[in-house]
Image: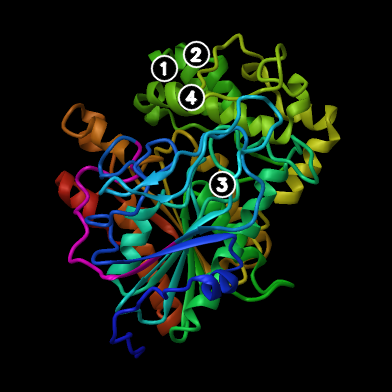
């Protein structure tokens, strides 16, 4: 049994040694009476990039029925960023604590395209580390979903870790916001594919830095990775690469509906159909529903499509296609006008050129597309135990185009013995979508369910697998409990 720290951890008066140890450009440290999101003043309330605090505010990743975290967990929080280029196209307001004081400096980028941030701004490559006073030697590294920042997973993953006495670290993938694809290399203002290539290195950097710091406080006994959506992709890549010609940092991972990147299937191999079929898909016209089903969408999830059309489909297609294949529109959003700078939300009409995007054709027309995807592609070559959870109602990353294929990659690498894949019956991409339908329609009352408790159950199972050799149940579909209340669905899940 690991002995927890008995004394409160203190922030040093001089942070320079910790800053050097972390390899950071800037850090700050706070002793906090409650590191969990219930009372922690130091988290990001923004709905687009942060965690949408307080839960279940706009943009949160958990259901409003999720039980708030308790009791308080005291300890320290370190905020900082590693050296990186400023993001000249992402407004960076100072993150403000509950008492109104900024705890990470910010800036507003100059409006001229191609310029960099003013001096004194915080940069990309932001991170947060939390160490509870009762730290037991475990470390959880979180991947970051969507185009969000290092605080996005605070409720769903940081609180889970802290409740168990684990330390926690997260990062922003090195680029965030709707214009994340505007990533420069060697002074270039746009280097296709460079942004996503950075995601794996930033995840590993966070783990390595946190381990270095924690080693001055005690012994890191176990190290796990976990993440949802793009954070799930980061987790997959972290476990695929770990110890495979690189330093070993992890003991296992939990991937919650991770994004699949490959030359066989990726986001913009099916999203254009969802855009081209508007408004028929949203209205439930059978021919449009059939068209979406043909590219991988679950027809049963049709009640979710109106929301996804307005929030996810257009923006996701546009910005990820611009990351990997900007030549399709000559480095502009629609084929006309200046170099593309995307708004926080972007609705793509069926006559937009991205609605006509043909992934197979573009692979033939633009050979660079395949090489860019290959550089970030999932391999399935798992170096440690991994558990995937994915909902069968996911309307952004349908399981047929994503985790079903990832499980095949794992099998092709002969790694299935260290892999479990649980399809969560009724789970969709983000748990607040359950709230929009529960008690409102039969879809919410009989089909949907939140995934968060299943993801946390998977983390519990992963730790038992790694630390006690207790293998989780074989891969299967987790049935939705009949007659369960919203509170039960949002807080209970068995992998059996």
Residue nearer the viewer, 50 or 274:
50
**Disc 3 to disc 2, how far (Cα)?**
45 Å
Residue that carries the numbered disc 4 in the rendered image: 345
Q: Which circle's residue, 3 or 2, is located before the other in the chain?
A: 3
Tell me the SS state at disc 3.
loop
Residue that carries the numbered disc 1 in the rendered image: 282
Whether residue 289 is situated above or below residue 458 in the rendered picture: above
Residue visible at 70% across and 41% down in the picture: 264
156 sits to left or right of 271: left
Q: Residues within 10 Å of mark 4 (few under 14, many from 20)?
A: some
Q: Nearer the viewer, mark 1 or mark 4?
A: 4
Q: How many marks do you count on the picture?
A: 4
Whether residue 59 is situated above or below residue 311 in the rendered picture: below
Residue that carries the numbered disc 3 in the rendered image: 120
Q: Which circle's residue, 4 or 3, is located before the other in the chain?
A: 3
Query: What residue range appears in magenta?
Result: 59-78
Tell me the SS state at disc 1.
helix
Quadrant placement of the N terminus: bottom left
**Disc 1 to disc 2, how far (Cα)?**
6 Å
**Disc 4 to disc 3, how far (Cα)?**
28 Å
412 sits to left or right of 424: right
Residue that carries the numbered disc 2 in the rendered image: 278
288 sits to left or right of 270: left
């Amino acid at each position: 049994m690991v002995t927890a720290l008995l004394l409160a951890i203190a922030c040093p008066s001089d942070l320079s040694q910790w800053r050097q140890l972390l390899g950071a450009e800037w850090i700050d440290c706070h002793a906090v009476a409650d590191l969990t999101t219930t009372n922690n003043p130091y988290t990001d309330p923004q709905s687009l990039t942060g965690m949408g605090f307080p839960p279940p505010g706009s943009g949160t990743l958990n259901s409003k029925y999720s039980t708030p975290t308790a009791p308080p967990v005291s300890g320290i929080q370190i905020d900082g960023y590693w050296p990186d280029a400023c993001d000249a196209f992402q407004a960076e307001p100072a993150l403000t604590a509950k008492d109104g004081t900024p705890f990470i400096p910010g800036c507003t980028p100059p409006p001229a395209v191609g310029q960099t941030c003013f001096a004194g701004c915080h940069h990309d490559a932001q991170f947060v580390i939390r160490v509870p006073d009762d730290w037991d030697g475990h470390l959880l590294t979180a991947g970051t979903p969507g185009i969000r920042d290092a605080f996005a997973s605070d409720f769903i993953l940081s609180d889970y870790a802290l409740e168990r006495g684990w330390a926690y670290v997260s990062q922003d993938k090195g680029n965030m916001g709707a214009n994340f694809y505007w990533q420069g290399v060697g002074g270039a203002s746009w280097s296709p594919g460079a942004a996503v290539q950075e995601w794996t290195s930033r995840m590993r950097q966070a783990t390595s830095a946190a381990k270095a710091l924690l080693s001055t406080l005690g012994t890191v006994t176990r190290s796990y990775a976990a993440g949802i959506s793009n954070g799930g992709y980061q987790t997959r890549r972290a476990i695929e690469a770990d110890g495979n010609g690189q330093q070993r940092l992890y003991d296992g991972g939990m991937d919650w509906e991770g994004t699949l990147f490959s030359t066989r299937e990726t986001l913009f191999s099916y999203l254009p159909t969802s855009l081209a079929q508007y408004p028929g898909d949203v209205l439930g016209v059978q021919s449009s529903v059939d068209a979406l089903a043909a590219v991988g969408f679950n027809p049963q999830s049709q009640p979710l499509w109106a929301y996804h059309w307005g929030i996810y489909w257009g923006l996701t297609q546009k910005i990820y296609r611009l990351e990997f294949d900007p030549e399709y529109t000559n480095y502009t959003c629609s084929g006309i006008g200046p170099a593309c700078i995307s708004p926080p939300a972007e609705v793509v009409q069926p006559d937009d050129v991205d609605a006509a995007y043909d992934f197979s054709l573009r692979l033939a027309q633009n050979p660079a597309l395949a090489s860019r995807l290959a550089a970030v592609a999932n391999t399935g070559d798992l170096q440690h135990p991994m558990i995937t959870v994915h909902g069968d109602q996911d309307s952004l990353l349908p399981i047929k185009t994503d985790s079903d294929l990832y499980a095949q990659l794992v099998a092709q690498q002969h790694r299935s013995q260290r892999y479990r894949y649980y399809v969560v019956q009724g789970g969709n991409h983000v748990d607040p979508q359950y709230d929009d339908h529960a008690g409102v329609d039969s879809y919410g009352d009989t089909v949907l369910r939140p995934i968060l408790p299943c993801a946390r159950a998977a983390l519990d199972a992963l730790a038992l697998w790694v630390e006690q050799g207790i293998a989780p149940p074989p891969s299967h579909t987790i049935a939705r409990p009949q007659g369960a209340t919203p509170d039960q669905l949002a807080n209970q899940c068995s992998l059996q």
